[in-house]
Amino acid sequence: MALRALFAKKTLTCASSFAPVSACLDRCLGSSVRQDRALTLAALPDLAYDYGALEPVISGEIMRLHHQKHHQSYVTNYNNALEQLDAAIAKGDAPAVVRLQSAIKFNGGGHINHTIFWQNLKPVNEGGGESPHSSLGWAIDEDFGSFEALVQKINAEGAALQGSGWVWLALDKTSKKLTVETTANQDPLVTKGATLIPLLGIDVWEHAYYLQYQNVRPDYLKNIWKVIDWKYASQVYETATA
Amino acid sequence: MALSLGSSSSLSLASPFSALPGQAAKPPSISSSAAGKIFLNTKSIEKKHLRQFQKATKVLSYYGLTSPPYKLDALEPYISRRTLELHWGSIHRGYVDSLNKQLAKSTLYGCTMEELIKTTFNNGNPLPEYNNAAEIWNHDFFWESMQPNGGKLPWGGLLQQIEKDFGSFSNFRDEFVQTAITFFGSGWVWLVLKTNEKKLSIVKTSNAVCPLVWGDIPIINLDMWEHSYYLDYKDDISKYVNNFMDHLISWHSATGRIVRAEAFVNLGEPKIPVA
């Protein structure tokens, strides 16, 4: 009944509506089992295509490792950090709350970024690589001159990025302008601007390409355009500019 | 450059200013005859000598790629030859080439590598040469921090210092491994001798940052960029770090470095065993 729902971690509940119940729980069970709201934990999203479907641009081995190992570990560690954060908040342990921020930013960012990335990719026979049309296509021409100019800019910034990070095609919600941004490590795009929406993100961490392209990141960037799903980017753009 | 001596007029190179026999004392000028023979203007000989002299006194300090002190397959099976071929032969070499290209157009030459790193770090606002210079130094240091049949335990003064600063060798090992496993992004894990605190410490730096810029003395480092381990270990960082600790780390190099460091940092009285 209601008690079981409180303890089921995967349900989303509203804190305020359970406040009187939690007060009662507190008295009954003591403060050690104080869960007046359940935590929504992250879950690894499935890919919309097989691991080998993006070959020969991105090998099946890379896709499998990238999804099952790297993204999964971000999800697992993010969930761990969330649980620890929840406990720390409940206890009022401010140093612990602050200490957990870097793990949340890194692993949560990794989860956010990779979820977007899987949707940015599409096998060639399902429309991957087709250049953008309609409103996004016009916006690209307006803000960058041409589609080729955008590709060149993203490739240049991606190749020049030191260490690990991401290169983004971003839409500024307020100015409605498109820009190319880079973020370090697993920082999500919002760390570069609260009004920025990611349309397209390309992972330039070495794990995204090293097994296949070794250290020749420019080749990886040149080839990845063949499997980019511009339809998804267009959808995000149209929703945001509606 | 060969000079051809023609029949019509000959050029004596022994004394550019001497008059030619049967001619007024006038230096021969550049002319290219129909036969294609070219004679040097003495003024340009003068200039050439001067230029060579100038070249000899102008010092341009460019850097070269030093090889690891072992063959590229010597660290197998812990680091494969293929990884070293790419890591050293392509990535490390790439940094050297990039730095040399940058230095050709820059005023920053004539330094040692350490000086270049400290200068270009610019107190946290790194100049463009910093990344290449630091990565060259970091990688040189890394190859020498490893050896075939490495690992096991340090000995003597180094072991004593580790036990003093970490409690025990296994505490140090655990902390080092833990630091490496929880690494976010690209960078390096170091065992450094902190010059101010006068003790050994484990630090992590991101991307190309090197503890030299803070005046600390590195003793050992471990490359945590994915290109160092991805081909051999994929995402299994724990196995990479543990293999490094157990089989690759060169305590010989570390001992040499800390002995040198003691010339700069007073680590206290040595423990002289009583007979």
Image: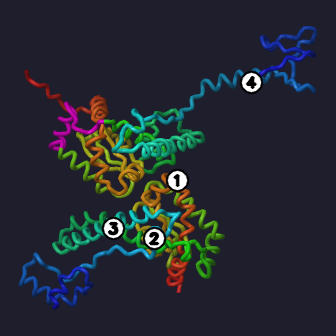
Q: Are marks 1 and 2 on the same chain?
A: yes
Could you say which is closer to the camera, residue B156 or residue B109? B156
The secondary element bearing badge 3 is classed as helix
Whether residue A183 is in magenta: the answer is no
Q: Is residue B255 visible?
A: yes
Q: Quadrant of residue A133?
A: bottom right
SS category of the residue bearing label 2 = helix
Marked residue nearer the N-terminal end (1 or 2): 2
For badge 4, the amino acid type reads Lys
Q: Looking at the image, which residue is at 24% across and 68% down?
A: A97
Judge depth for marks 1 and 4 and give the one in front. Answer: 1
Instruction: For mark 2, name the chain.
Output: A
Across and down, in percent, residue A29 comes to 7, 81
Magenta residues span B149-169
Q: Are marks 4 and 3 on the same chain?
A: no
User: Which of the two labelled residues, at mark 2 and mark 3, occupies the earlier sequence position?
Assistant: 3
Label 3 chain ID: A
- In contact (CB < 8 Å): disc 2 and disc 4: no
Q: Give the residue displayed 30% in from the left and 39% down from the top.
A: B249
